[in-house]
Image (tube, rainbow, N blue to C red):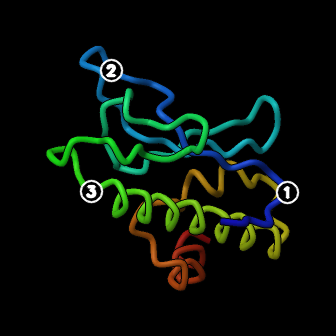
Amino acid sequence: MERTTLYPIKPGCFRPRKDGISIIHIQYCFTSKKKPLLDTGIEIPAKYWDKQNLKISRDIPPEYGNAKRMNDLLDAQLNLIADIIKYAEKRNIADKDRFVKKYYKPDLDIYSLDELVKKDD
C-alpha cells in the first residue's frame, strides 16, 4: 500500500497489556515530539504482530479473528488517517495532530468530515 502523506503513519502493538493482548494502534508521527497513538479497536496477542511487515501474522489462532480480514481493516484505517491528514493539509489546518486525534474514529465516513468540522465551528 502506498501513502502519499509527508508524515510517517505506522501501525503497531505499542502497549501490550500484562495478559499479552494488545490493541493495535496507529502512530502518526507529525513531529519527533508529536506522535499520537490512534486506537484501531483491533485486539490481538502481541506475539502475533509481524513487526517487520507491520501487519497481523497469518499464524494468529482463529479465536482471535481472521488475519486477512483484520489486515484489510487495518489497511482501510491507515488510508482513512492519510485522508484525514490530506483534508487538514488542504484546509491549512495548523494543528494537524490534534485535528487527526479529534476526528479519527475507526468507523468514520470520510465524506462526513466536512459536516463534522462545520458542527464544531
Q: Earlier in the sequence, mark 2 or mark 1?
A: 1
Q: Amino acid at mark 1?
A: Leu
Do the numbered discs 2 and 1 sit on residues whose CB atoms are within 8 Å? no
Front residue of 105/48: it is: 48
Q: Amino acid at mark 3?
A: Asn
Judged from this view, the residue extending furthest toward the top is: 18
Judged from this view, the residue extending furthest toward the left is: 63
43 displayed left or right of 101? left
Give neighbour class at mark 2: few <14, some 14-19, many 20+ (Cα, 10 Å).
few
Residue 83 percent location from the top left of the image:
66, 71
Residue at mark 2: 17
Residue at mark 1: 6
Q: Earlier in the sequence, mark 3 or mark 2?
A: 2
Q: Which mark is residue 66?
A: 3
Give neighbour class at mark 1: few <14, some 14-19, many 20+ (Cα, 10 Å).
few
Distance from label 3 to label 2 (Cα)?
A: 21 Å
Do the numbered discs 1 and 3 sit on residues whose CB atoms are within 8 Å? no
Q: Which mark is residue 105?
A: none
Residue 21 percent location from the top left of the image:
29, 28
Front residue of 120/72: it is: 72
Residue 86 percent location from the top left of the image:
75, 70
Front residue of 83/120: it is: 83
Rendered view: 47 above or below 5 = above
The residue under the point 52% across, 38% down is 12
Q: Earlier in the sequence, mark 1 or mark 3?
A: 1
33 displayed left or right of 108? right
